[in-house]
Image: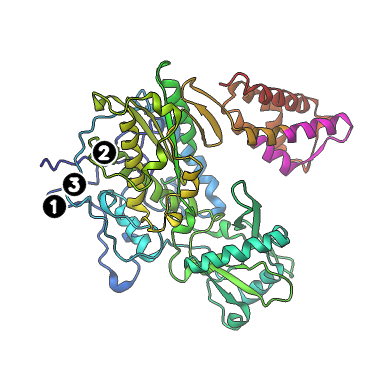
Amino acid sequence: MDETFTPVLMFNGQGEHDPCASNNIQTISDVQCHVGDATTSTLPVFEGDKGQAPSDERLGSVSGLDQPRLRATGEVIIGINKKKLRTENRPKRRALQQAQTKPTPWTEYTGDTVLPHGADDKSRPSHRNSMCPAGLALHHPAAETLLNWAEFGCPTQTGKPWSISEMEEAIARGPHQSALTPEALEHFAAEIEEKVVSKQARVVEWDTIKDNPPPELKILPIVAIPHKSKAYRSILDLSFRLRLKNGGFRDAVNDTTVKTAPGGAIDQIGECLSRIIHAFAAAEEESKIFMAKWDIKDGFWRMDCREGEEWNFAYVLPQPEGEPIRLVIPTSLQMGWVESPPYFCAATETARDIATTYIETGIRTLPNHKFEHYTSGAEACDTLPAVADINNGFRYALEVYVDDFISIVIPASQEQLRHVANAVMEGIHDVFPPDDDDGNDPISEKKLLKRDGQYDVLKTLMGFEFDGVGKTQWLEEAKREKILTTLHSWIRMASRGHGGIPFKQFETTIAKLRHAFTAIPAGVGLLSPCNRILATKPPIVWLNSHKQVLAAIIGCRTLLRESTKDPT
């Protein structure tokens, strides 16, 4: 058998990945993959160190997997100076975009990839949580880094320890008010019970540790955010600055965090939607684009902190008055922590690369995935023949946005769609171990039951409705109606002489409008008066005294209302 294997090295951590082409295959000069002698690379090989975590110097040499630093000065990035890194990266990103040469985001399927020896071995070493590479993922340049995180956890450097008095003041502050309603208390009781059973958190009583608390202990307020698919989403407020009794402040954990996650893991997270739109624009008018998406259940919770460092993310358990003070100690990365996205995206981007390689194998060479039946059944699929005469004639693009894997395909048969679906799910399971209980599998069965993974020509992707036949796009209804309601209330207040809007509300709504205008490019110009207000940051925005802003708001509302009648 031909043992030639060309790995698809698309991991965004390269810093060299084509930002305008989702499937551009790049060569990494300092990584070599040979099947004859397994996989050889310049990545360091971790030899165990007698159960100790490898030093930071041994975390890998692939560009983009390193700790981010300012190129000009070599300064270590922490949360409080991350804006400097964004400023420095902006011209680099633009230069890469201008240098891109691939004219289309679509990849023509060839089916000539032969997997290396051992790629079908799905056995895994001992690992801490629900992320550990296996199979083909072990041949990826990020494999050693992911194995390190799987065995030892992700490093969490959040600044100097708190004093016991600061801990006590944080406990007295307690959870956010949103977490103390009867409904929220019920939500937290059920959630914590589930997290303790799954070993993603533990609960300790403050009285048992208050005399000698762990040095890493930091107590943050927990917030209950209403969520569309469940009652609440729990988010730890790691941007919270604790006001001390002496009049000072304890800096927010996000501001004191040393950034150690891969610098390139989220370089292109903001380009995903643009590439999807580009793919639709580049498709022929007569072609039909089929879409499907898969969600990673529990996301950040599937990756652990380093042992002992989980105390950085403690919070007071919301519970009825009179109960002893209990602290929840999550063992996993937390939503709200500045470093959680790059750590998690390093894993999901790797899974995307593996899935792309599986797509390039021959039709009918991959096993049927246990969730394959969720990907078919749409009426639009019935218009396709079951099998194509020539299988190397379809095109595809695969994107990942944090925990969402998005597949768009221009197929010639139903069999080709099944092949792509099996490849994507196989790639996910090569990084996130499958679970015998489908309800706990990393691929969210709950979302599959909602037909998210079913290939169809109409699909909601990243908050927008896409039509693969008409090649059109518009903001999904729930988001549009929420923005329209807010704008209508502003206009009514202004007409009654009460046009005062808190700046935070104004800033948030304008950000949502800017996102909505991704599908209505003509609307961007309307935001110019609003941008001038955002630059000055007044505590209250008075629409009565800013007639241009009021006119812009009226125009934005009109465009949104008309957007579904004539979608872009």
Quarter of the view holding residue 184: bottom right
User: Can you give x and y, in whole percent of width and height, for residue 505 in the image?
Assistant: 73, 42
Q: Is residue 182 left or right of residue 347?
A: right
Label 2 crowding class (10 Å Cα cut-off): few <14, some 14-19, many 20+?
some
Does residue 327 show up magenta in the picture?
no
The residue that appears at 58% across and 81% down in the rendered structure is 209
In this view, 315 is above or below 368: below
Q: Is residue 364 left or right of residue 290?
A: left
| Residue at mark 1 to residue at mark 3: CA–CA distance | 11 Å
| Residue at mark 1 to residue at mark 2: CA–CA distance | 19 Å
Quarter of the view holding residue 529: top right
Amino acid beneath label 3: Pro
Q: Quadrant of the C terminus?
A: top right
Numbered badge on residue 37: 1
Asked whether the beta carbons under mark 3 and mark 2 sit within 8 Å of each other, the answer is no
User: Can you give x and y, in whole percent of width and height, for residue 516 in the image?
Assistant: 61, 31
Does residue 486 show up magenta in the picture?
yes
Task: Point out the tag, 1 or 2, that comes first from the N-terminus.
Answer: 2
Amino acid beneath label 1: Asp
Numbered badge on residue 27: 2
Name the residue carrying label 3.
116
User: Can you give x and y, in whole percent of width and height, for residue 155 in the image?
Assistant: 43, 62
Q: Quadrant of the N terminus?
A: top left
Amino acid beneath label 2: Thr
Front in this rendered view, residue 40 or 434:
434
Of badges 3 and 2, the one in the foreground is 3
